[in-house]
Image: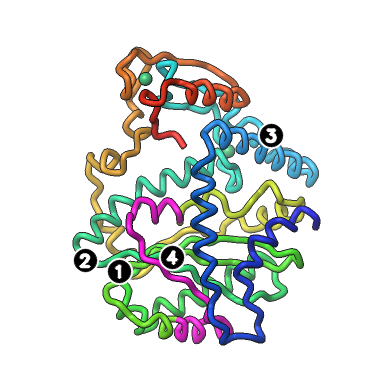
Amino acid sequence: MKQLTLSAVLTSRDNQPVKSQRKPAPRTYLDNRVTKSQRENKRTRSQRARERLQTKEHLTQLAVGLGEVELADKLQRCHSRLSVLTCGRHIARIIPNFTCEFRLCPDCGRRRSRKLQNKYLPIMRGFMLHRKVTPVHLVLTQTHRKENRKQSAKRIKDAFKRLHRNSFFKEHFKGGTWSLEFTKDKNGLHHTHLHIIGFRRRFFDIELLRGEWLTATGDSHVLHLKQIKDIATGLREVVKYVSKPLDIRRFGAEDLREFLNLKNMRMFGTFGEFRDFCKDFEPSDNDAAAVGDLESLARDLVEGCACPQCSQPLFDLRMSGKELPQFYEQVESSPPDKVGTSWN
Ligand SMILES: [Zn+2]
Ligand SMILES: [Zn+2]
């Protein structure tokens, strides 16, 4: 259990022992989270690429240990050969030879969270415009029990279903999105949170919402709420749990086994009026531009096209996945006024 000690430090911030139910919520939780994500954003692309390689290596080892040979093989092949469309100073596009689509794969997770952002950002903007709602980030927590990851996730999702279907919630929110985050403490207890982007139609006393959450869960009133100033940032914050459900480098073989058993569990979803709005939403051609997703816009670029950032001709550079961090380093050392791709 040694590999879980560090994550325990992170989860202990939102401890909520059953016996002190009415204790005020620790206010530090979201602040810590924000600081942590800002710290993550400060890491360079080469550092992050290197971390993804380490995570994949670690997952592969665990898979081998569990006798999951096919999974280990897929992980090793995923993003192992790359075709990089570059002018030498900017990266316009990266095409991998193979994607494993395994839920915990950091490369596939990144692609998945980018897809979610591209899909939902235009819808959210449209929804906010038409329904005159303001987005908030709501974090819902529950008490710890001796249960497995699946049970823990089901318990909080069921409680949330009860919450968002009640009249208080419907009166104040017009739906939104949810995503699951998993952490585990040093005693092996699961801390499962729900991150909600809620579209608020009117203000309310936070204590009332705490009361409603207590009714829905039966034993937890702990939640955190903050206004989302920029919906693109808010959405990015929330979908990152879809790509990175927890710190996999501290994962043990048992954690991987548990995750393999979660195969069909949904980690992200929509609810309420927002859910219906998504069904009717017609995406326009300008959505990728509105989202600022250079990668989607770069989809049509081929060798010989002009680099979108400096107009120099692009060429196709073949490399192994292991060489990518080094290439990023080279790109990062280009003159600062010339650097600035969407890659993160
Ligand atoms: Zn993958
Ligand atoms: Zn360029």
The kind of residue tagged 2 is Arg
The residue nearer to you, when weighing 63 against 46, is 46
User: Label 4's element?
Assistant: strand
User: Label 2's element?
Assistant: helix
| Residue pointed to by mark 2 | 131
Dot placed on the residue nearer the N-terminal end, 2 or 4 = 2
Q: Measure how far apart labels 2 and 1 are at the Cα level.
A: 10 Å
The kind of residue tagged 4 is Ile
Disc 1 crowd rating (10 Å Cα; few below 14, some 14-19, many 20+) is: some
The residue nearer to you, when weighing 166 against 212, is 212
Q: Position of residue 162 (x, y in %)?
A: 46, 80
The residue nearer to you, when weighing 193 against 23, is 23
| Residue pointed to by mark 1 | 273
**Which residues lie in the magenta part?**
210-237
Depth check, mark 4 against mark 3: the one in front is 4
**CB contact under 8 Å: marks 2 and 1:** yes
The kind of residue tagged 1 is Glu
Within the image, what quadrant is residue 212 found in?
bottom left
Dot placed on the residue nearer the N-terminal end, 4 or 3 = 3
Dot placed on the residue nearer the N-terminal end, 1 or 3 = 3
Disc 3 crowd rating (10 Å Cα; few below 14, some 14-19, many 20+) is: some
Looking at the image, is 34 positioned above or below residue 319?
below
Q: Residue sitting at 70 percent across and 36 percent down?
A: 57
The residue nearer to you, when weighing 79 against 324, is 324
Q: Measure how far apart labels 3 and 2 are at the Cα level.
A: 48 Å
Residue 224 part of the magenta segment: yes
Give residue 196's mark. Answer: 4
Give residue 73's mark. Answer: 3
Q: Residue sitting at 20 percent across and 59 percent down?
A: 129
